[in-house]
Image: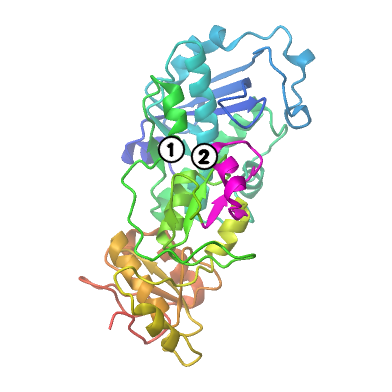
Amino acid sequence: MANVGEVSLDAGFGSFTVVDVETSGLRAAQHRVLSVAALTLDTAGRVTREFHTLLDPGCDPGPVHIHGLTREVLRGAPPFADVREELSELLTDRVMVAHNARFDYGFLAREFDLTGDVLPVGRRLCTLALARRVCLPVPDCKLATLASYYGIAQTRAHDALDDTRVLAGVLRALVADAARLGVAPPLLACPPKENYRDSWSRRTSRTGPKQPCLYAYPGRLGAGGPLVQGMKIAFTGETSVDRDILVAEAEAAGLDVTGAVSKLTSALVTNMPHSGTGKARRAVEYATPVLTERQFRTLLEKVRPGRRKDDPAAASRRGRENRADAPLSGRRFLVLGGSHTQAAAIRARIGELGGSAAVNMSARVTDVLTLPGAESDHRLAKAVELDGAGVTFGDSGPTRVVTGNSQVTG
C-alpha cells in the first residue's frame, strides 16, 4: 500500500486530520453539532492523536433514531466553546478530511462562528468525491460500503469516533488506489470564514468562472425526462456527491447550471424538496420540475443532443441525420481530454451525426474518443480494460474512435 504521507506530500496536501460530526439536522444554518471526533495522521497514515466529545448546545437533538444522542445522553456535555481550542490545534495547518466534507466543514464553520472564532481550515478533502473519482466496483460510495469493500470493520455507524476510525482506514486505501491509477484527489481550497453567514449564502458558488453553455434553451424537463443539452439546472440542499462534482458533470454534459430558480429553470435537483430554501420555495411558486440527486444522475447518463447557439440550422440538420441510418446512430461516446470548449464541440457533433455523449465510463458506452491530455484522465484506464480496446493519441486533435472506424470531426 502506498505511503499516505508520500502521496499527500507529492500532491501538495500536507498533513491530514480526519473529522466527523453528528448533528441535530442537515442544515448548518439552523441545526447544531452534537458530537465531534478528529484524528490526526502521520506520514504513514497512522493515527497519532484522537479527540472525541459529546456536545450539549441545548437544542432538540433531532433524529435520535439515527445517532442515538438523546437529551439524557447529552446532559452534562460541554458546549462547543469549551472544546474549540483543542479542536483548533488538531485542524490548524492540516488538510481536513471527511466523508461528504462539505457537510462537516459547514457545520464546524458555523460552530466556530457562533463562538466568535474562525474555523482554521484552509483546505479540505472529501473521501466521497475521491471514491467516485477512483471508480471502485461498488454499488454506492457510502462509508459503510467503502469500509466493507476494503475490509475495514465498522462497529458503530453514526458514532463520530468510530466513523473517523473507519474513515482513516478507508482514506489510506483510497489514497493508495488513487496514486496507483494516477487520479488527482479533489483537494478544495476553503474560503475564509470571517463572515460565515455571507459565505453560507454563497456555498454553492463555483471556485472559478461559470462556463458559458453552448446550447440553446430547449424548455423545461418533461415528465420522466429526458434531459436535453441547454436545459437550465439548479441545485439546492445537501447532496451525497460533492456539489462541485455534480456541477462539473452537468456542465460537461452540456447543461446550463444556474445559481437561482426562475420561470425558465428546467429542473431543480434536491434531496429535500420541502426544505424551505429560497430555491425550493421558488420551485413551488413556478411549478418547476423537481428531481432527486439519484434521478438526476440517472438522466445524466442519457442527455439528448441540443441545438448549438451558434448554429441555428443544427436542429433541422440533426433531424435529417438522427435516423437509424445516421453515421453514429446507436453509438454512445465518452470524450476524454481537451478543453471544455473543444470537448463540448465534439459532443455536439456526435449528436448531430446521430450518436449520444456520455459523462462517465459505463457498460452503455460503445466508443471512446481521446483529445490531447486524455492520458491523465482516470476514466481512460477503465476504458482500456473493457474488451481489450486499444487507445491511440493525437498531438493536435482527436484520434480515431476506440471501437469504431468513424471520424466525428470531419
Residue 92: x, y in percent?
40, 20
Residue under the image location 56 percent in, 71 percent down? 363
Residue 115: x, y in percent?
50, 11
Asked if residue 286 is among those painted magenta in the image, a careful observer would answer yes
User: Tag 2 or tag 1, which sits nearer the N-term?
Assistant: 1
Magenta stretch: give its range. Answer: 266-290
Amino acid type indicated by mark 2: Leu
Residue assigned mark 1: 4
Instruction: Tell me whether circle 1 and circle 2 mark residues in contact (CB < 8 Å).
Output: yes
Its colouring scheme is rainbow
Under tag 1, what secondary structure?
helix
Residue 296: x, y in percent?
57, 57
- Residue 171, numbered label: 2
- For the question of whether residue 270 can be seen, the reply is no
Q: Relative to residue 30, is residue 12 drawn left or right? A: left
Amino acid type indicated by mark 1: Val
Q: Relative to residue 47, is residue 64 drawn left or right? A: right
